[in-house]
Image: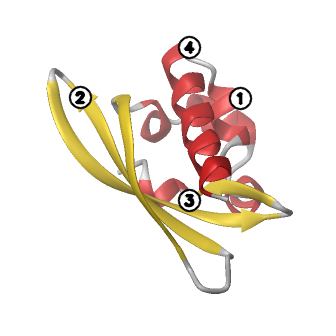
Amino acid sequence: MEKKIEEAIREFFQAYEKGDLVGMYACLTTDFQRRVPLNYFRINDRYKQDIGLLKKIGNISIAPDYKTACADVEIAVNDNDRIIGIALEKDFGEWKILPESVFD
């Protein structure tokens, strides 16, 4: 299960590094996609911010009901390393990122 969570996080950051907004959007929760249309996601500056480059995925905590998880993720932003917590939820059988844990 942790491997699937790591894959979801890596996929999101790989899309970010390529400038693939559609790929990033696909990694976010269905609830977010219902509230924020893809076209809005693509043009809104809030979702174009520098979220940093993935360096390492650390500790992953999975809720007892296996519906939510949190991962400590080390990123590099402007040559500064920091650790952020990325929240994920099980969404139609796949792990998806809660955008509030990535975008300010």
Residue 104 % position (x, y): 35, 51
Q: Label 3 neighbourhood size at 10 Å, few (<14), some (14-19), many (20+)? A: many
Q: Are marks 1 and 2 in contact (CB under 8 Å)?
A: no
Residue 53 % position (x, y): 36, 26
> Which mark is first along the chain, 1 or 3?
1
Q: Amino acid at mark 4?
A: Lys
Q: Can you tell which quarter of the image residue 14 is in? A: top right
Residue linked to disc 4 = 18
Residue drawn at x 67%, y 54% as measured from the top left: 96
Residue linked to disc 2 = 77
Q: Amino acid at mark 2?
A: Val
Q: Amino acid at mark 3?
A: Leu
For marks 3 and 1, give the CA distance: 16 Å
Residue 37 % position (x, y): 74, 46
> Which mark is first along the chain, 2 or 3?
2
Q: Quadrant of the N terminus?
A: bottom right
Residue linked to disc 1 = 22
Q: Reply above or below: 63 against 7.
A: below
Numbered circle sitting on residue 98: 3
Residue drawn at x 64%, y 66% as measured from the top left: 89
